[in-house]
Amino acid sequence: MRGFTDYNKDELFNKIEKISIEKVDSQVITRYDGRVINTTNVSNRYEVFDISKYLKDKIDAIEKNFAISKYKFTLTRGRQYLQLISDKVNIGGIDFYKSFYILNSSDKSRRLSFNVGLYSDTSKFYIISSVNNVGLVKKHLTGVTQAAEEATVGINDETFNDQIESLNSIVGHRVSFSKLREVILGDKPEIPQINHRKFDAFKNSVRFGASDGKISITNEQRSMLLTESEKLTTINKSDDFYLDAFWSFQVYLTLFNKQDSHIIKNETERIMKITQWAVRNSVLESLGI
């Protein structure tokens, strides 16, 4: 896996133990291996979070139920990020890895977050959704330490079951393009601009998929895919078409593979709504679709 290191607990702990974060008057000072790497002014409500202790505690807790094989640890000035890769599971012919994501910042650039999800190395996308009350996204204000501890007490060997079941439920199904549009744009009367941009990006990926021969579309449907989301107010029944639900899920989440885990979590839960509209291939084929 590119960017990951083979898991060695002693080696990783040695890196983590070099992190030091303290608050002096109205400043938070971040050090690594004794060297100051960031200084940030904060309010009196800011709570220093002991990320070094937290990371080590969570690694110990995760090891009780999962076999950690690789990790990615990055520290950039006032930001600390750790991703752990563990057991492999195959869904729809694609290998996924059970993964854990912990992000902290001592420069106020990011909220503290702890999430769990499935990672595909071959397709380069992540799946993160709500898991039995496991998970956290919280500002570094009073109470963040207690909230972080409470958000991880439910980690066990069943942590990923719901995610795996949800993915398996759309394998071998198809979903109409019009329903995908509804899912991505959302159900608010006023559609946020960001949702239009997400749908435009998704349409482009579908169009590229057609160019690569992965799907088949008509010239009219290609023209529809080239129409800006804001101008595509309706989809004519004659222009609608079906896409593989599992493929669509992957294509959409690939758009966010460089985003923070809490964003991926939100988008996973958005696109997972296609389970409500997915139809078995056999049913569609019997209808001649």
Image (tube, rainbow, N blue to C red):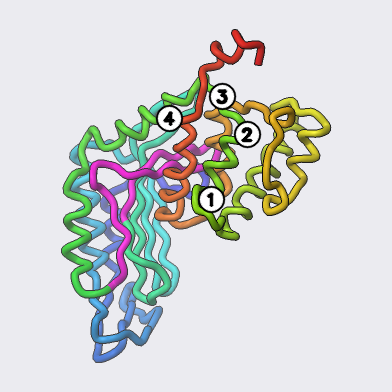
**Disc 1 to disc 3, C-alpha distance:** 22 Å
Residue denoted by label 3: 174
Can see residue 122? no
Eye-nearest disc, 1 or 3: 3
Give me the residue at 73% from left, 28% from top: 238
Residue denoted by label 4: 167
**In the displayed structure, does residue 149 sit left or right of residue 205?**
left
The x, y position of residue 222, in whole percent, is: 78, 36
Can see residue 96? yes
What amino acid type is highlighted by mark number 3?
Arg
Callout 1 touching callout 4 (CB < 8 Å) = no
Give me the residue at 17% from left, 55% from top: 150
- Of residue 167 and residue 276, the one placed in the foreground of this image is 276
Eye-nearest disc, 1 or 2: 2
Residue denoted by label 2: 177
**Which mark is first along the chain, 2 or 1?**
2
SS under mark 4 = helix
Eye-nearest disc, 4 or 3: 3
**In the displayed structure, does residue 221 sit left or right of residue 102?**
right
SS under mark 2 = helix
**Disc 3 to disc 2, C-alpha distance:** 10 Å
What amino acid type is highlighted by mark number 4?
Leu
**Residue located farthest toward the right when viewing the structure as drawn:** 219
**Residue located farthest toward the front when viewing the structure as drawn:** 189
Residue denoted by label 1: 256
